[in-house]
Amino acid sequence: MERIMSGAYRKLLVPLCDPDQYRGLSARLAELEQFETLHPQEQAAILEQRTRSLLDHAYKTSPYYRLVFDEVRFRSVDWQYGQPIPLPELNRELLRANMESLCSRAFRPDELRRFSSGGSPPTAMWRDVEAQREKAALEWHLNRLSGTAGARILELRPADRQQDGDMSSLRPTLQERIQGRFNALIRNADDDTFWNLLRFMNRRKPEVLRGPASLLAMFAEWLRGCGMAWHRPRRVIATGETPSPESRQTVTETFGCMVTRQYVCPDIGILATECEQGERLHFHPLSSYISLAPAGQSSEGSIYRLIITDLLNHGMPLIRYDSGDSVLFDESPCPCGSWYPSVSAVLGPTIENLILPDGTVTAGVPIVTRASRSFRSVHGVQLIQRAPDTMHLRFSSDDNSGAADRELGVFRKTIEDAFRIPLRWTLERVAAIRGETSGKVRAAVCEIPQDEHGRPLKH
């Protein structure tokens, strides 16, 4: 650990091996550390200045934003700090349709780097070189705050969610041989995948295991029944949706270590990390300006869509970008004392929320994870809600003895207990639960039409 975090490593070795990512890393980390020491009012003033600067830059250099600003008659001086930016939201469909006009004319082609979005299907996106370096430094800084910077990390990644285009050919060597960071690309959450992942983890012996919360929970459940010994990291980091208390306990008990959270928007990068005192995800104010749009109600409180303005990428500005994720927000001050914008839970994509008979919206992944705890013969499931009282269950199993049928019966009973009504079921047996083009494996999918606030539409 000391070797990895040494000044020579940060100042010389890493920037030399991968200048696109890490040139100036040591100086950028020093700036981030200095920012942490400032008074909250000074930090807020910097956030406001960076946001206005991005708005001015977007209007002057991006044809798309010049048109949008003019259509709504908006300039950066019209925006009041602390309020949502009064511009239309940008989503993945608009991004794909306006890719060229979104890019800033202030950069030459050789000053931009291409990467793949986390959408389905993936979309080629762009960021300027300085933004790429600032994002790399921010990730390093947030990992250091969580005690994992420089650690050997095994990251579970959806198979199609990889950076491409101008990615340095030295980067895999740098990550694996020097940084000790390894990527395990996951296409399907099935036996073959988990056997390969177990062998890889036991061979590499990572200090940190990081990946989507639902995938970590499924892997932990699978390990308990695999009959083999497994390496135990010193920390697990859950990304994506917030793990349910049951899932968090399962992962903690399986790996015998602390489970913390980070929020990573695949189209933007790492944005938030969890504080220990309040167990909230705090968004770093140098990275983004956050807005919340009402999206419905749940038993745990109001649900909001997470709208992000990326403050680092000037090469292709993303202003009021719909992350596709829904969150829970707590207005009370965080016990950790930080003023940084925070959310208490990430529920995951809105499509993964389920609608209870009374119209309440609830996160689908925790319900499916809880109902799957007794699986031994069933390798994976996907729950699809087609009406408030109608479910389609897609499952994979190679069992013909009747054990899978019994396990699925327990699963359906658990789901009905959560909904508190009898449900109509259809079942579909498949070879494996396939991920989307983006690689995302959705445990729950809601096909009930909803309005912009997440309420089911009435016919």
Image (cartoon, rainbow, N blue to C red):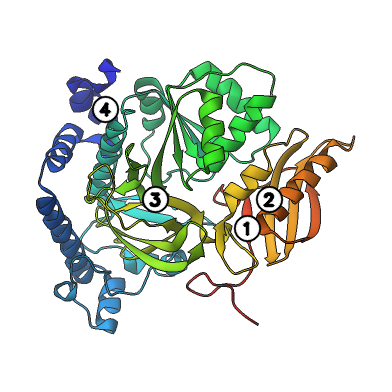
User: What label sits on residue 344 in the rendered view?
Assistant: 3
401 vs 351, left or right, is right
Q: Quadrant of residue 254?
A: top right
Q: Which amino acid lies under the numbered mark 2 shown in the image of this protein?
A: Gln
* Separation of residues labelled 4 and 1 (CA atoms): 42 Å
User: What label sits on residue 382 in the rendered view?
Assistant: 2
Mark nearest the camera among 3 and 4 is 3
* Separation of residues labelled 3 and 2 (CA atoms): 26 Å
Mark nearest the camera among 3 and 2 is 3
Q: Can residue 166 be seen in this snapshot?
A: yes
Give the residue displayed 67% in from the left and 47% down from the top.
Answer: 434
What residue did someone put label 1 on? 445
What residue did someone put label 4 on? 14
Vertical placement of residue 19 versus 457, above or below: above
Question: Residue 181: x and y, percent?
Answer: 41, 27
* Separation of residues labelled 2 and 4 (CA atoms): 42 Å
Question: Residue 429: x and y, percent?
Answer: 80, 48
